[in-house]
Image: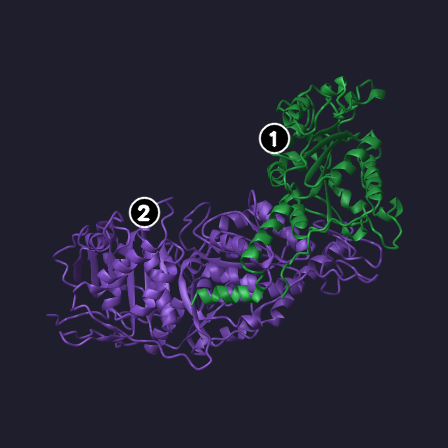
């Protein structure tokens, strides 16, 4: 039994007039409609944090309607290690009545509601928060003037927040100028006018000092700020991928848009195809030509690619397939997060077709996973699936700029003449296909094939050969794990529970583990990046804990376990493996994990450890 | 860091080195699995002749196919090649061609592969116009799966899936190809070897997506399907008389292959119709050329920055 003794990080910050309280991190939620540019404000704040060597993480919801609809952007920035975008907000900016009503519950007690008094009438009896009305719309129109109407009220809000949290105005101004550079000068001028007006708004009692990040170590690489899809796309470019093909689908599309625009600069080609099947086929054609190619999609699109993926396994063709998961099945919830494609990624398609599946865990990791996937695909002549998800795809994080000179890979088709002894499908060794253009020393030119074949690629229905070739393809994928570094556990290396996650759950699990440990529970955290094959040595790690709790965003299925938990139970036959799942289309809050782990560990009262009150709480405000 | 990941666009001239010219002997690979009497044997023999005439470097030739009797083709030709999944060989081949402009890509397949399961790809490959040649060996029946109705089976054809006689309207391959924007559209017959060779040769020499439909009889499941175009079976072998542009009065009646409307009219003639080149568009740029142009224009804008410089600039913008 653990006692509920952990206070919030700062408790209630005293804020009598005359002193400006310091806070370590703050969660700001902007709620409006999709055309209000709240993503832009969130983006500015995220990039400012990146440039100030602060940690940052964002979270956004996008309406799946074509234009318009409620939309939010949440940004958490601060000087500590920011692992999740924050369960509840310290500041809620509400542009409309519906924004206020839908998101009031996300505000912590003691938090600040900044509402547009032109559109919002908050509940006058709500005394647990500080409600501040600002005529955002009319003040913006007044500041900018002319026919610009209320466009720019997002930048006005940015000014308000900049003053409120003592943000770096010079850096923000620079970001605004960069963002609107290339457009006409009026736009930059109007944006700066709106910013200044927001900054000048008199709300003297709303002043906080957000702790600055530590100065970077000498020689440290600067921080960059971007989202997961962008990081993944540039990871592929760094890994020497110059060819790809795809079909648009949310939330995958922004990767294909980036590659379509970027690849020609690098002498490459990206083809928008007529459908998902054509896309993977064209990508396989590029790979067969000797240039490792990429295709990608989201859940339903991956299903359509499955037959071709089976061919890639049989023909032993390298290929990168990105799957940015979303809520399913079918069209499901296209703009929400779900991790329900794990089994599809591993076992989808027909027949026995082992392949490699990797899952990046942060925005930064999207970049490095892309590089790792390309290395594996090339080395083992195999399709590799990168399982990203909607949350990673769309959220913004800051991370150290990659060491590009070290990481850049130059890849060219291997057209060296093949020796007379060359076999396209040898049973006893790893082989790479001979791309067309390679002269065959034997005078015999190979046919890459989806039919079961002998070592020379000739079709065969020999039972013995089908058994041997199936085993060869399986052992090849098993061998991929031999190159993996030993998995690292965070936190306690033995004890009550090991929390396992994959993909975007990394941050909330890590933060929940930190709080559980702070409350005296002995827990460790292992985020599995190598989904298939799994890392070696997991059984030894599992043996050190009383419970292995797998946290994932999917359904518990007919037998009571999430998809990764099902796989781990099948692999290790360890009855200590249990499952925490959910299907609400949202990322995990730290408190959700915290409470459900506490339940599984029978810790009793779980009201400890979590920050209940906002860091902005002002009990003595005058 | 290299500027381009793909070799420059060059169409290699016939080999000038000391290698012996391509012969049927060099080009022969596995013995065909087709039934005795199958029309596809003649298509294969004609293709050997075409390659002998073209005499490309052997390693630069790619023979590719999907699934079906005719799609076994690549195993029988000693070139680089592949046997892909049903109906999807065209987008795969487009990937080969676009990524490797130095290659000569030939795709073979049947009517089910091309017009049914692969119908969407046929339309869009034609629209995109990649540089490759597609030979459709049309037998108007599913042979590999043993006699089901195919998209070109005529109305009344009795198959295992239509034992009472097919009644879905068959596809008109020439009209479909013309409508999709294929830039070279021709039709031939597996009993007319010289004509087949001529059509495939012209298709191979066309700069763009070139298609030859060859009526190739399945003696096992649709015997006599194309007798209507065989004089020795009492049919009519009627060639398209191409315009000579010689100003003669009889030339006015000849077919202008650049005239799309005339091609449609020709394609709409009643069975068995005419054989030869229905349409040829030499002006529409290939996707290969358009992509290379995009690359050249883009690289001019980036002042031919190296890959590393480009990526470093991108990350600098994310600071």
Q: Are marks 1 and 2 in contact (CB under 8 Å)?
A: no
Q: Tell me the shade of chain B.
A: green
Q: Would you place residue A27 above or below residue B169 in this image?
A: below
In the figure, is residue A67 to the left or right of A528?
A: left
Q: Quadrant of the C terminus of chain B?
A: bottom left
Q: Would you place residue B69 above or below residue A587 in this image?
A: above
Residue B305 in the image: state x and y as whole percent: 57, 63
Q: Which quadrant of the view contains residue B153?
A: top right
The numbered dot on residue A69 is: 2
- In front here: A461 or B224? B224
Counting labels gives 2
Residue B155 in the image: state x and y as whole percent: 66, 21
Tell me how far mark 1 sits from mark 2, CA to CA: 41 Å
The numbered dot on residue A429 is: none
Q: Which quadrant of the view contains residue B87?
A: top right
Query: In the rendered image, what is the letter of the chain coloured purple?
Result: A
In the figure, is residue A56 to the left or right of B135?
A: left
- In front here: A431 or A179? A179
| Res. A589 visible in picture | no
Instruction: Name the residue rendered at 60%, 53% in the picture.
Output: B296
Please tell me how crowded label 2 is: few (under 14), some (14-19), or many (20+) other residues with Cα within 10 Å: few
Disc 1 sits on a residue from what chain? B
Task: From the image, tell me which residue sits under label 1.
Answer: B179
Q: In which quarter of the image is the N terminus of chain B?
A: bottom right
Q: Would you place residue A525 above or below residue A461 in this image?
A: below
């Amino acid at each position: 039994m653990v006692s509920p003794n952990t206070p919030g990080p700062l408790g209630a910050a005293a804020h009598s007039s005359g002193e400006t309280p310091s806070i370590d991190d703050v969660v700001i939620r902007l709620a409006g409609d999709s055309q209000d540019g709240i993503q832009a404000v969130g983006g500015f704040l995220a990039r400012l944090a990146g440039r100030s060597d602060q940690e940052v993480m964002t979270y956004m919801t996008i309406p799946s309607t074509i234009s318009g609809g409620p939309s939010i952007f949440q940004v958490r920035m601060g000087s500590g290690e920011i692992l999740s975008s924050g369960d509840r907000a310290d500041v809620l900016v509400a542009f409309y009545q519906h924004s206020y009503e839908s998101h009031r519950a996300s505000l912590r007690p003691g938090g600040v509601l900044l509402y547009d008094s032109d559109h919002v009438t908050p509940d006058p009896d709500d005394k647990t928060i500080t409600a501040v009305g600002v005529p955002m719309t009319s003040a913006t129109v007044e500041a900018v003037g002319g026919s610009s109407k209320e466009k720019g009220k997002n930048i006005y809000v940015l000014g308000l927040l900049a003053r409120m949290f003592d943000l770096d105005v010079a850096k923000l101004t620079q970001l605004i100028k960069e963002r609107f550079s290339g457009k006409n000068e009026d736009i930059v001028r109007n944006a700066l006018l709106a910013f200044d007006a927001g900054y000048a708004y008199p709300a003297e009692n709303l002043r906080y000092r957000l702790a600055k990040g530590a100065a970077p170590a000498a020689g440290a690489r600067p921080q960059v700020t971007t989202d997961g899809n962008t990081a993944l796309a540039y990871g592929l470019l760094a890994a020497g991928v110059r060819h790809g093909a795809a079909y648009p689908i949310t939330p995958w599309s922004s990767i294909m848009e980036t590659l379509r625009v970027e690849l020609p600069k690098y002498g490459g080609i990206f083809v928008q195809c007529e459908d998902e099947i054509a896309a993977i086929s064209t990508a396989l054609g590029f790979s067969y030509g000797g240039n490792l190619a990429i295709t990608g999609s989201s859940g339903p699109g991956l299903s359509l690619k499955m037959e071709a993926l089976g061919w890639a396994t049989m023909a032993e063709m390298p290929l990168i397939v990105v799957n940015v998961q979303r809520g399913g099945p079918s069209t499901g919830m296209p703009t929400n997060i779900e991790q329900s494609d794990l089994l599809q990624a591993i076992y989808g398609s027909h027949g026995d077709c082992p392949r490699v599946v990797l899952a990046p865990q942060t925005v930064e990791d999207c970049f490095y996973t892309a590089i790792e996937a390309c290395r594996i695909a090339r080395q083992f002549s195999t399709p590799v699936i990168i399982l990203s998800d909607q949350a990673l795809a769309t959220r913004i994080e800051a991370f150290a700029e990659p060491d590009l000179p070290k990481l850049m890979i130059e890849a060219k088709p291997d057209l060296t003449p093949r020796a007379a002894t060359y076999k396209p499908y040898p049973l006893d060794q790893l082989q790479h296909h001979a791309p067309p253009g390679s002269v065959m020393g034997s005078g015999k030119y190979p046919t890459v094939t989806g039919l079961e074949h002998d070592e020379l690629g000739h079709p065969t229905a020999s039972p013995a050969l089908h058994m041997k070739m199936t085993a060869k393809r399986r052992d090849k994928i098993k061998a991929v794990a031999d190159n993996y570094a030993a998995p690292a556990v965070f936190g306690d290396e033995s004890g009550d529970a090991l929390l396992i996650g994959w993909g975007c759950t990394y941050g909330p699990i890590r933060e929940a583990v930190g709080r559980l440990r702070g409350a005296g529970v002995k827990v460790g955290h292992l985020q599995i990046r190598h989904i298939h094959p799994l890392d070696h040595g997991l059984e030894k790690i599992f043996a050190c804990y009383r419970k292995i709790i797998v946290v994932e965003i999917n359904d518990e299925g007919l037998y009571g376990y999430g998809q990764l938990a099902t796989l781990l139970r099948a692999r290790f036959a360890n009855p200590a493996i249990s499952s925490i799942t959910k299907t609400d289309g949202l990322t995990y809050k730290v408190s959700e994990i915290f409470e459900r782990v506490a339940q599984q560990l029978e810790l009793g009262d779980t009201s400890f450890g979590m920050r209940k009150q906002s860091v902005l709480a002002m009990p003595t405000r005058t | 860091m290299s500027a381009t990941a793909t070799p420059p666009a060059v169409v290699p001239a016939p080999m000038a080195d000391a290698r012996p010219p391509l012969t049927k002997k060099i080009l022969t690979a596995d013995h065909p699995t087709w039934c005795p009497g199958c029309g596809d044997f003649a298509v294969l023999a004609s293709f050997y002749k075409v390659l002998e005439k073209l005499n490309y470097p052997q390693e630069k030739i790619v023979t590719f196919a999907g699934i079906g009797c005719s799609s076994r083709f690549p195993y029988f030709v000693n070139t680089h090649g592949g046997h892909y999944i049903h109906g999807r060989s065209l987008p795969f081949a487009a990937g080969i061609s676009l990524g490797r402009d130095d290659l000569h890509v030939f795709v073979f397949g049947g009517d089910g592969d091309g017009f049914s399961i692969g119908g969407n790809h046929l339309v869009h490959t034609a629209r995109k116009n990649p540089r490759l040649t597609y030979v459709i060996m049309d037998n108007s029946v599913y042979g590999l799966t043993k006699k089901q109705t195919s998209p070109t089976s005529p109305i009344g054809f009795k198959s295992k899936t239509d034992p009472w006689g097919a009644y879905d309207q068959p596809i008109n391959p020439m009209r479909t190809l013309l409508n999709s924007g294929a830039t070279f559209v021709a039709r031939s017959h597996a009993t007319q070897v010289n004509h087949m060779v001529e059509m495939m040769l012209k298709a191979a020499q066309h700069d763009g997506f070139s298609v030859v439909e060859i009526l190739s009889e399945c003696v096992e499941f649709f015997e006599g399907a194309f007798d209507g175009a065989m004089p020795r079976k009492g049919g009519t072998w009627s060639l398209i008389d191409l315009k000579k542009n010689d100003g003669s009065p009889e030339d006015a009646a000849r077919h202008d292959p650049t005239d799309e409307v005339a091609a449609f009219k020709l394609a709409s003639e009643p069975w068995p119709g005419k054989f030869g080149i229905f349409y040829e568009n030499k002006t529409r740029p290939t996707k290969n050329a358009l992509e290379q142009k995009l690359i050249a224009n883009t690289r001019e804008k980036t002042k031919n920055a190296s890959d590393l410089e480009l990526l470093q600039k991108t990350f600098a913008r994310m600071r």
